[in-house]
Amino acid sequence: MSRARAAIILAAGQGTRMKSALPKVLHEVGGRAMLDWSIAAASNTGAAKTIVVAGKHSPAVADHVAKVLGDGASAIQDPPLGTAHAVRAAANALAGFDGDVIILYGDAPFVPPERIEEMFAMRAAHGGLVVLGFKAADPTGYGRLMLGADGVVERIVEHKDASESERANRLCNSGVMCADAKLLFELLAQVKNENAKGEYYLTDVVALGRAAGHKTHVLIGEESDALGVNSKVELAAAEAGFQKRARIAAMEAGVTLIDPDTVFFSYDTEIAADVVIEPNVFFGKGVKVGKGARVHAFCHFEKTEIGENAEIGPFARFRPGSKLGKKTKIGNFVEVKNSVLGDGAKASHLSYIGDTDVGAGANIGAGTIVCNYDGFDKYRTTIGAEAFIGSNTALVAPVKIGDRAYTGTGSVITRDVPDGALGVARGRQTNLEGWADKNREKKRAEKAKKDQAE
Ligand code: UD1
Ligand code: CA
């Protein structure tokens, strides 16, 4: 990379069509805010500086940017007067920057990183400006790229300002643009708002650049590269697009998906080769699954690491903070939260395991509940290696079950159980010899008497 790079991400639009209190660019696709997809694209390309242009109407956007990129990474555009005006709002934040700038949108988060890379390369090779274009199935609403005989873009005409013949041109502007920073701000200073919308159009820099002797080249991408989100319906379409790509990527990496359309991934899901995933499984953020594991149908995961050759589900739920070792087994209707399970540990049926450290080879019987919360605080439980927790044990945290220790079925364990010991805490059983037979006889006799009397 010879020249320094920076990114400007436009995110000052109102997003009213989302009908939401949450700013549009903070809505998530694949578990990540749309804005963060664009920020990640900028950082992937090696941008030394990324400036997000936010509107005054959505302070949550600037707050989000401060958290993700640090202070000084957002610029406020107030009021929003068009895309050129928005880019200009980033000028102060980029003062002194010498290099190339890529302009991205906060609500069009799926420009492939390799496309952005190609744009920088084209700019390095040809100078001037580079825009990302695409052939639209239906070009309505998009700016049109008007090419000269030499194939360079002479100007961009917005749909509202276009003539009938210009509207027939299906080569559209994605909005993504790459330019030398100094040239870009020089051209932006000349942009006027004499057009159908009365806005300052970023797209006008193409004709202005041409007049000053700077060519604009076009990189032609896919229509899906430019996919923008304006409504919940479009958000769902963006999500569907992400899921489709994620499923294909997983299968290409060696993961078996029995019914791919019913498995949902997050942007950061990591699944190793030779994992088999049965239908109807949801991976929230921060999940890793080790090779050879099998995930049976209907499981839900968040922020959890599953070890190699583990067997999970069906109907298992993993809440944040869990780590399972190799060959662990979590069976049906088991919920695991913020717990660590050693290699080969098992909880096969109907259990809650919260804030617990489980040693290797431990077996947790059906119906075991870790009582980790007293209504105010949470406490940890430790279950030793090779321990055997009898069915229907309640483990009242904080409590420690030693290595190889047993708990008696149905026990409420409130005190530590030493290594190798048996902890039993339940009413002792008494058998009353003959009681049931005597009782039955007595009841029968009573009933017969009553029937006679009637
Ligand atoms: C823009 C392009 C058009 C292109 C289309 C691709 C211009 C003039 N037109 O049109 O050529 O085909 O995108 O989707 O650039 N924004 C601000 N501040 C503003 C105005 C917009 O930050 O004052 C942001 C919006 O939040 C949005 C992006 O810029 O992320 C694009 O704005 P929008 O109004 O949607 O532009 P279009 O009319 O769709
Ligand atoms: Ca738009």
Image: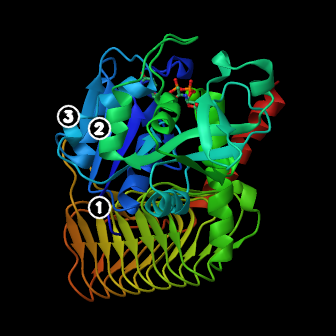
CB atoms of marks 3 and 1 within 8 Å: no
Badge 1 crowding class, 10 Å Cα cut-off, few under 14, some 14 to 19, many 20 or more, is many
Asked if disc 2 is less than 8 Å from ligand 1, the answer is no
Residue occupied by mark 3: 92
Classify mark 3: helix, strand or loop: helix
In the picture, measured across the screen, residue 187 lies left or right of residue 375, that is: right
In the image, which is nearer the foreground, mark 2 or mark 1?
Answer: 2
x and y percentages locating residue 389 in the rendered image: 39, 75
Mark 2 / mark 3, whichever is N-terminal: 2
Distance from mark 3 CB to nearest ligand 1 atom below 8 Å:
no
For marks 2 and 3, give the CA distance.
20 Å
In the rendered image, residue 82, in percent from the top left (x then y), is placed at: 44, 21
- Quadrant housing the N terminus: bottom left
Could you give the CA–CA distance between mark 3 and mark 1, rounded to whole angstroms?
49 Å
Identity, as a three-letter code, of the amino acid under mark 2: His
Question: Which quadrant contains ligand 2?
Answer: top right
Camera-side residue: 429 or 22? 22
Name the spot of residue 375 as percent of width and height, x first. Answer: 24, 41
Q: Provide the secondary structure element on which disc 1 rests.
A: loop
Instruction: Specify the amino acid type for callout 3.
Output: Asn
